[in-house]
Amino acid sequence: MEAIFTFSIVQSALELGCIYSLVALALFISFSILNIADLSTDGCFTLGCAVGAMVTISGHPFLAFPAAMAAGVCSGFVTAFLQTRMGVPSILAGIIVNTGLYTVNIAVMDFSSNVNLFGCDTVFMLAKDLSDAQWYGDWYKILIVAAVVLFVGLVLAWFLNTRLGLSIRATGDNEHMVRASSINPVFTITVGLCVSNSLTALSGVILAQYQKSCDINLGTGMVTIALASLIIGETIIGKGGMFKRVVGVILGSCLYRFIVAVALRLSVPAECLKLVSALIVAFAIAFPYLKGQASFYKTRRLPLKAGGKAGEDGDGLC
Amino acid sequence: MLTLKNISKTFNPGTVNEKKALNHVSLELADGDFATIVGSNGAGKSTLFNAITGSFYVDEGQIILAGEDITYRKEHIRSKEIGHLFQDPMKGSAPHMTIEENMALAYLRASTAAHAFFSRISGKEKQMFREQLSQLDMGLEDRMRQPVGLLSGGQRQALTLLMATMVTPKILLLDEHTAALDPATAEKVLGLTRKIIAQRKITCLMVTHNMHQALELGNRTLMMDGGHIVLDVQGAEREKMTVDDLLMEFKKQAGKQLDNDRILLS
């Protein structure tokens, strides 16, 4: 078998890995830290993509970023409002917002199911024109997305260690403690979901400019993919400080893209990709458990190997 | 310091599960009072605490803390001035956050300025946390960067006590906070509680099932039953009271024999 990792595969895996790592970071906030399964992620990603695309088409490639993030904040606020003020269970709140966002997204895209940005200025095109060097032509996309992800990662790690960040982390860690201390969970959940969804939307707008198009179904399955990245990252990096965990999530996202790229390279048909994602997610989530089971069986077998007697004792216990 | 005027709370009103948990309870705690509360399960002790902390709003009556009517004040705003320790040591601190971070959260009560949102734990604060931890004499001051989940139940309860009193609360509510600990650790945590309360003259309410403790600790003993405060002794009357007297009272009030009063005597 010739090289599985060609240069272009590594390159596109890194680019997409960085772009999608923002969604993984969003789920890191909502799922790992706040302990809320935010299922509005799919719709919110498309929302960021659609808002970003429309603002870019109207000639403002830079304004597209804050605009998309603002849209994400609104979406996160509605999800948070439903669960903190209306008594809607958190999973349902996400599903409701996700459903509603479909119409919103279509409306943003002027009631068409896809738009393309060919011929518009995007941040990537503007950056490409900066230099003619050969290496720059190959790497400028990675440079841009890596810079954005690095910036977001650093700000996020800093934010989670501020007092507000600590309050948000405590909210997801121990509700009894939060009730007994002076933290307002309504406020911390709202802030957390707004930040989380703004990152999801940011990822959407970068993808829109990156692939110069936006499709209404772009976000489908996004929550699964991001969850896979998140869990791969947490599995390889393990527990630690906020900075370490944020780096882990970004690495997890890139690794996930490599796995998908390899699957494609091994001629898995593109139609099967969702199934491949689902399998990767299932495996990544099951892995820590299976590892524990494996070591358990190992320790149980030790006395068996040492002599028949111990084995009989073991049977007697059962 | 704390005044309860005729407060009542009924759970599930109008259904077969209707339960009058608090029935016109009135209580006046003076500044620096340390009262113990005894009562059988379901007597309304924890409900009384939850009414004070604001887990729910009372159906009628008034709660006044340090001259301010807090009857309809939200829970997280009240908790700036109320320390609350639970029986379960796991409830008082965030397991996946470090000791330092947990203490910083408790210290949030002290600051009200909006800019404090984006401030980080300063070196000066770390130093202060370290000094306070060293008072516990459990070696926690050298483990400040470890997650709280690694601590034992006793260590966690001691930490929670420290956190609840870091910013002196107007009232401290202790809900059987040593009941889940082994005897030696319970003794230690209780000693700390006494020390902190005495040093800072904190007004305190403490639920206990230990009749001996109920008479020995603090300056006042309350007994609850069926949502009422049925006994309130202090001063000379309390001095004279023995564990047996209290048990007799307990039986009389409960209106039934306790089959396990040997346990209560402990």
Image: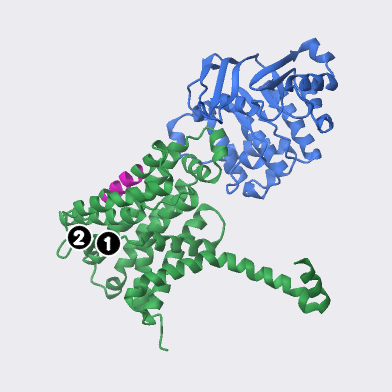
Q: Is residue B168 visible?
A: no
- Of residues B25 and A222, the one nearer the viewer is B25
Which residue appears farthest toward the front when viewing the image? B16
Label 1: which secondary element: loop
- Picture quadrant of residue B205: top right
Label drawn at residue A217: 1
Which residue appears farthest toward the bottom when viewing the image? A1
> Mark 2 highlights which residue?
A113
Q: CA distance from mark 1 to mark 2?
A: 8 Å
- Picture quadrant of residue A117: bottom left
- Picture quadrant of residue A229: bottom left
Which residue appears farthest toward the top when viewing the image? B236
Q: Which chain is blue?
A: B
B24 displayed left or right of B156: left
- Residue type at mark 2 is Ser
- Sequence order check, earlier mark of 1 and 2: 2
Measured as percent of width and height from the top left, residue A180 is found at 57, 33
- Residue type at mark 1 is Asn
Q: Are marks 1 and 2 on the same chain?
A: yes
The span picked out in magenta is A68-77
For mark 2, name the chain. A
Shade representing chain A: green
Q: How dense is the environment of label 2, judged by Cα within 10 Å: few (below 14), some, or many (20 and up)? A: few
**Magenta span includes A304:** no
Please report contact status of discs 1 and 2: CB closer than 8 Å, yes or no.
yes
